[in-house]
Amino acid sequence: MSVLLEVAGLTKRFPVRGGAVHAVSDVSFTIEEGESLGLVGESGSGKTTTGRCILRLVEPTAGTVRFRGRDITALGRRDLRAARADMQVVFQEPYESLNPRMTVHQIVEEHLLLHRPELSKADRAAQVAELLDKVSLRSEHGRRRPHELSGGQQQRVGIARAIATDPAFLVLDEPTSSLDVSVRAQILELLLGLQRDLGLSYLFISHDLSTIQYSCTRVAVMYLGRIVEVGPTREVFEEPRHPYTRALLSALLRPDVDQSVSRIQLEGEIPSAITLPPGCAFASRCPVAIGACVEAVPELRRVAGDAQRAACLRAEEIPALMATPGPG
Amino acid sequence: MTARQLLRTARRNSELTAGGALILAWVAVALLAPVIAPHDPASTSFAALQAPGSSHLFGTDRLGHDVFSRVLYAPRADLYLAVSGVLLALLVGVLIAVPVGFTRRWWGDVVMRFFDGFQAFPVLIMALALVQALGQGSGTIIAALAILNVPLFVRVVRGQVLSLRERRFVEAAVAAGNPTRRILFRHILPNTTFPILAQATISIAYAIIIVAALSFLSVGIKPPTAEWGQMISDGYQNLTTGQWWIAIFPGLAVVTVVLGFHLVGDGLQRTFAIQRRH
């Protein structure tokens, strides 16, 4: 497999009175062709801003985003517009993300109109019908407006338009979190099916660990704008090497009620994103922090296996130091 | 919005229905004036100052005009001028406000401060000054009405654009690869129609009063063209001598048509408010 997307040193600061909010700090990762990378973290951890920076829906303060080797952050307006055909997004709130004045047909057709100018009106109509079929909508849904559809149907429209121009990469920004539980699984299945059929790569942003576990081959955990742990989903979930990941996983509800799970209760204050501490941002809440933790930001380094990396000075000792989140 | 939606809205909204009926009635009168008016509005061949009666429904004025015929012909001037002036203002206002509201750069604020300064002048004084500067005539009145109303449309539309540009569907339009121009006019503008329509109807109501006021002050439409303000101006001195009909009937005409536009404006605003809650 080859690398499709390469994010390096991505940083976004939002200026505010008396300083700046450090939304994303020095985030680096890669996504390979056909792969899903899960991006998890609590709200405010910078995962959504990371997704937006990659698509340049907000301009990153620093860092590069290479898509098939080409630096997206250096593109001019015209080139960027053209590049958008290959990298699309599915938003969290399907209703909010659809123009209330446009019909479903117009919404999906617009992407073809913008990126496939050679198509005739009839060709576009045929493609829109095909796209609606791909997301299990009927062609008569094309005449409806967003408010006439259910939440699940609205998200199907959001997905249909995202794949209209045959992109290689999608940012999925919490695509299922605002939906009813009953339709979440359907939308998730649809996304995974499309990935298989179309060979898509996903950056799957979610605060829902079970969704990530189910749908992603690799996962990155964010805390206050930084990636604190990244690796193959199975390894990270089985043996987390960062205390924050461990705390996050211990909060996950498990279906088996007999398993005794010791929850890790975090105490202490979350630092302000405006005045970040000089050391590890998690140190103020970390149950195993030591003196060195507050001195410098720990580097994301390989700790186990081939690909599991964590930004913790004590990563090697973590399994022994903290209660295992899994059975036992 | 389709015609069917409009009808459905009208049924639920009595202000909109009543106002719309008043406006439609006056538009019909204006169009059909040559058919329904009993006399030539410019003819002065009748005995002056006759009281309303069977030969002259609204009586005659000092010069021997048939007041009824003139009241029916007047909307051809008043409505035409008011609607043209306001539509011109709407067009210019929208073209200015949409980019001004969308940009996050400094020049957006500069444009707004300019219009703030503009609006500091009292409306009628401004209208008088403009007519003085541009010279009397219908073109001048339309231009004056447009200039007076542009700041209002700029303000209303900019406010809408400011809130719309933060909406997720606009971000989705950026992500789709839309050029800015298309985002402005395909995604943002269609979502501002209700407030624009509401502002337009209220502006037309005020514009009718301004047209009449300019004529009352003898700087508007020149006689013998039938025009309500002119007729009121001609007739108000006779109010004290008992010939009330010369000024009262055109006055009532102005009241009903202005009321019609205000009702529609309020009705639209209410419909918009309800729609926003959903």
Image (cartoon, grey):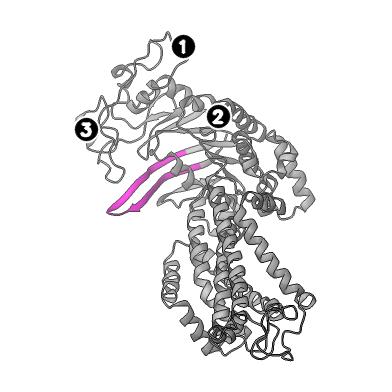
Viewer-nearest residue: B105 or B212:
B212
Q: Dividing the image into 4 quarters, which one contains the C terminus of chain A?
A: top left
Chain identity of mark 1: A
Q: Give the range drawn in magenta.
A: A6-29
Q: Mark 3 points at which residue?
A: A292
B245 is higher (above) or lower (below) than A316: below
Q: Residue A180 carries which label?
A: 2
Q: Can residue A167 be seen in this view?
A: no
Q: Do the residues labelled 2 and 1 touch (CB within 8 Å)?
A: no
Q: Does the magenta stretch include residue A34?
A: no
The residues tagged by marks 3 and 2 sit, at their Cα atoms, a distance apart of 45 Å
Q: Which amino acid lies under the numbered mark 2 shown in the image of this protein? A: Asp
Query: Label 2 vs label 1: CA separation?
Result: 23 Å
The kind of secondary structure element at disc 1 is loop
Q: Give residue A256's mark.
A: 1
Of the residues tagged 3 and 1, which is closer to the observer? 1
Q: Are marks 2 and 1 on the same chain?
A: yes
Please indicate whether residue A141 sits to the left or right of residue B252 in the image: right
Residue B69 location, x and y as percent?
72, 80
Q: Is residue A298 visible?
A: yes
- Residue at 64% x, 38% y: name it: A149
Q: Quadrant of residue B208?
A: bottom right
The amino acid type found where label 1 is placed reads: Asp
Position of residue B275 measured from the top left corner of the image (x, y, whole percent): 57, 48
Query: Answer yes or no: do the residues labelled 3 and 1 have beta carbons within 8 Å?
Result: no
